[in-house]
Amino acid sequence: MRSCAELPSAEACKHEGDLASRASREATAMTLVNRSDTTLDLYWLDFRGARRLYQHLTPGSRAKQDTFMGHYWLLATPDGVCVGIFKAAPQSLAFF
């Protein structure tokens, strides 16, 4: 079993500066489950790639985030360290 740091979503953190959401009218949603022992902050990476805080996920919580296809979402620790980046797809479920 691979560690979380080896998952594609965690690897994407290395490329945060190159990622920006693209305009889309195709609605979708993501369900995020925080299985870690720390609160995680959910950011939308806007059309310029800048972080826009949307919500906090406390340990053990689950949240649904409405979004659009091609939008990027980033989970970070409270001190801003990226733990994963996800690109919205038809049905997305992320566990951290």
Image: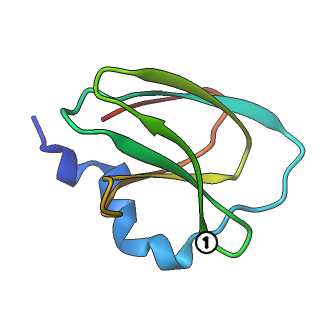
Q: Position of residue 5 (x, y in %)?
A: 19, 53
Instruction: Out of 24 and 43, give the one closest to the viewer.
Output: 43
User: Which residue is located at x 70 percent, y 52 percent?
Assistant: 70
The residue tagged 1 is 50
User: Which residue is located at x 44 percent, y 20 percent?
Assistant: 62
Q: Position of residue 37 (x, y in %)?
A: 18, 33
Q: Position of residue 11 (x, y in %)?
A: 31, 61
Instruction: Out of 91 and 73, give the one closest to the viewer.
Output: 73
User: Which residue is located at x 84 percent, y 59 percent?
Assistant: 23
Q: Secondary structure at mark 1?
A: loop
Q: How is the image coloured?
A: rainbow
In the rendered view, tell whether residue 77 sits above or below residue 61: below
Q: Is residue 13 left or right of residue 45?
A: left
**Image label count:** 1
Identify the image quadrant of the C terminus. Answer: top left
Q: Is residue 80 left or right of residue 70?
A: left
Quadrant of the image occupied by residue 1: top left
Q: Position of residue 12 (x, y in %)?
A: 39, 62
How many neighbours does mark 1 have within 10 angstroms: few (below 14), some (14-19), or many (20 or more)? some
> Tag 1: residue type?
Ala
Farthest residue toward the right? 25
In the rendered view, tell whether residue 95 sits above or below residue 72: above
Q: Is residue 63 left or right of residue 1?
A: right
Quadrant of the image occupied by residue 88: top right
Q: Is residue 72 left or right of residue 57?
A: right
